[in-house]
Image (cartoon, grey):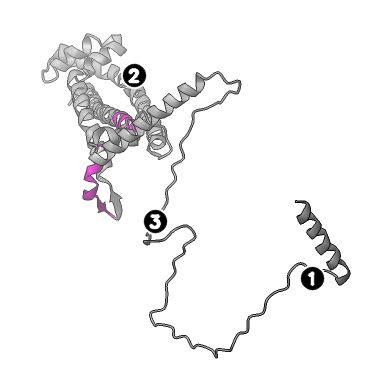
Amino acid sequence: MRPFVDVVLKLEKTSRRHRYCRGLLNLALIFLLFYTLLLYVSAPVIFARYSSYDFTLLEYPVRMKLLCTAAAALIPAIVITSLLHIRRKPMSVIRSIGDAYPLLRERLPTAYDNADSSGIVVDDLADGVSIDAGSVRRSAIISKKGLFLRMVASLVLVSLLMFVSSPDAPRFIPPEELESMITPQTDEEREEAADEAHQQQLMSELGSESGSGSGDAEIYGKPSVAVIEGTNIELVMFSDAGVGHSSRRTESEPISFISGTVYAATPVSSETYIDRLPEENRDLIKQYFMEMAEIG
């Protein structure tokens, strides 16, 4: 094998390896981008119904909702990466060498096409091309700048993914709102929502009426309703029970009373007003009333 052919074959092998690495980095970059976006819009909530299928792999728990989210990000990433890989054809090493080294632009393709031939002219051309091909640098033909930029972008997306994965990170759509959108409401939840809407409407009407009053005082803010919860008490009313009547529980056994000794009672009349007066004034008062009776 001629020396310049060995140089071309090594560069082609490096070019193929570079192409595969670029494809893998593209796949990782697109996957991280889609996965971060899905987490930002709270997509795992959609797959929360499969949480019963969670399992453990190598003593690490695997959550199905995150696994399904990763699969949803991986499928379009594979499709886009495949399209980019097919659209971008493999690099022609001989043409790239000719572009980087104008001295070999015409001589190298000719010598490579006649590498299996022999002759004075062909051998002389092959020897000259081999000498010039020895000075070809790999970095001038295959640039690693694209790989480096893709690696940096992947690291940035990994950092962003770690931030979005935290529970306190902001979301484009809150998980509660997305869950309410995809989960049908029950009859009880519909009734509660209708009652809440009706209550808010009443409060808005009360607020508008209070705001249209002619009073001097101003009330700031919306009125609120305090809901007081208590225990239902069953009241029992007894028959023939009026005001001041109180009921109490009595003993089940009858109480026996013992009557005391009866003594004879002698009635005694009480003193009148005139009898309680002093004796020196009784006659005077009697005379006064008698004169008043005669006059009247």
Residue on which the image places disc 3: 233
Which of the marked residues, 3 or 2, is nearer the chain's N terminus? 2
Which of the marked residues, 3 or 1, is nearer the chain's N terminus? 3
Q: Position of residue 67 (x, y in %)?
A: 25, 41
Above-or-below relation of 242 to 164: below
| Amino acid type, label 3 | Ile
Which residues, given as a range, are shown in magenta? 33-58
Residue at left 18%, top 22%? Answer: 83
Residue at left 63%, top 84%? Answer: 266
| Separation of marks 3 and 1 at Cα, in angstroms | 63 Å
User: Where, by quadrant of the figure, is residue 150 drawn?
Assistant: top left
Residue at left 14%, top 19%? Answer: 115
Residue on which the image places disc 2: 140
Q: Is residue 215 left or right of residue 287?
A: left
Residue at left 33%, top 33%? Answer: 177
Q: Position of residue 207 (x, y in %)?
A: 47, 25
| Amino acid type, label 1 | Arg
Q: Quadrant of the N terminus?
A: top left
Q: Is residue 260 left or right of residue 181?
A: right
